[in-house]
Amino acid sequence: MKSETNNSILIIGGGLIGLSIAYEFARNKFKVEVLSKNRSESAGFVAAGMLATHAEGLEDELLKFGQQSQNLIPEWIKNIEKDSGINCGLKKCGIVVPFKDIKTLKEFPNYKYGKYLNHKNLRKEITGINEKWAHGLLFEQDGQIDNRRRLMRALERACSLQGVKFQEGSEVKELIQENNKILGAKVFSATGETKNIFCKTVILCCGAWSKKVLHNLPIFPVKGQMLSIQGPENSMKRILFGPNTYLVPRDDGLIVVGATVENKAEFNQGNTPKGINQLQEGIKSLLPEALSWPQMEHWWGFRPCTPDLKPIIGKSDISNLYLATGHYRNGVLFSAITSDIIFKLIQEETLNNIETNFLKKFSLNRF
Ligand SMILES: Cc1cc2nc3c(=O)[nH]c(=O)nc-3n(C[C@H](O)[C@H](O)[C@H](O)COP(=O)(O)OP(=O)(O)OC[C@H]3O[C@@H](n4cnc5c(N)ncnc54)[C@H](O)[C@@H]3O)c2cc1C
């Protein structure tokens, strides 16, 4: 067994949250090392990239958390784009939520943040929407990032150029703990070696797999299947967010369609006929003509879920171990605020009242 010493910040998991945190530390001149089991399984490459604070119907502290992250995102993306040279496809394109009747619309949690669309105006916003949708709410403040094709690559590139050391294909099997401190991690590398990596500070960002490293974490996978279709250019400008399916139009006419929510699929890989069929039914129910548009790709991934659907962010009971996991359906949206909070915590910078309040709600102590 080989042994290595490293005093840098050690990030376990090179998915969306791990990369966001790595970037925050690296651009502030820290030495950062990222251990990543398998970059391509990261939900960061799976997500639709919606910034759907209001359209998702987030409530209470999750709503405030999302709103604060959404405020941070333009500056955050500007820095990533500057450091990577890659445009991340951030667009405040607005999200339309359709309703069959006015009663359901008025019961929608974020009703007051939306602009009401009657039958005619709904069709102005979404050409070709199914006749069964009579009303809509337009959340102009919501939008999207092209995470799958751009943001993940931009983060990886910005991190690399800022000196982050990546060990791809390195699975952390266990943390090496002495008393109340993590000394390092036992790692199984891509070349079949086992080695120990020592560090001062560890941040656990293993997404849906987090429980495999820290067994007491209440995290479980919720599988999501997705597909994409190629629409005519400018066929859709807004995201259309239906009850079971959403359509997210990218700049080049590609439309990302998601997603199944499978609580019992565990880590079962692959698309299924049932999953794809559900997405096609969803397209038919929202925008019937899009059923004839060519299908481009289909894929799947695992959302990191907690029992109360809130992320786990902050310091653990162990003095030098921090947690940033459980972002469930909103990891893209929450990435900016998560990296900001973890950086401030480790730097012992003063958090504002809102952040302190979030931390109480999102800490592991709540379970
Ligand atoms: C179908 C679907 C649609 C989604 N749509 C949206 C959306 O529109 N908007 C939004 O905001 N969010 C969305 N999300 C959620 C978002 O993708 C996740 O919340 C986010 O990616 C979580 O980031 P993460 O870094 O915690 O996990 P991941 O991105 O999954 O990364 C975890 C990484 O850790 C690595 N890892 C695991 N175990 C170990 C180990 N032992 N050692 C080393 N590395 C390890 C894995 O290989 C993986 O690369 C969606 C998710 C899915 C699945």
Image (cartoon, rainbow, N blue to C red):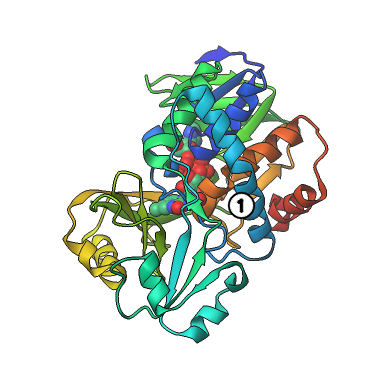
Secondary structure of the residue carrying tag 1 is loop
Q: Nearer the viewer, residue 79 or 151?
A: 79
Which residue was labeled with disc 1?
Answer: 311
Say if 123 sits above or below 151 in the image: below
Quadrant of the image occupied by residue 136: bottom left
Q: Along the horizontal axis of the image, is 135 left or right of 68?
A: left
Q: Amino acid at mark 1?
A: Pro
Q: Position of residue 273 (x, y in %)?
A: 21, 61
Residue positioned 51% across, 46% down in the render: 332
Say if 347 sits above or below 48 in the image: above
Say if 94 sits above or below 8 in the image: below
Q: Position of residue 112 (x, y in %)?
A: 62, 72
Residue positioned 59% across, 42% down in the render: 73
Residue positioned 56% across, 18% down in the render: 162
Q: Along the horizontal axis of the image, is 176 left or right of 139?
A: right
Q: Is residue 216 visible?
A: no
Q: Along the horizontal axis of the image, is 358 left or right of 133?
A: right
Mark 1 closeness class: few <14, some 14–19, many ≥20 residues within 10 Å: many
Residue positioned 50% across, 38% down in the render: 16
Q: Nearer the viewer, residue 14 or 335?
A: 335
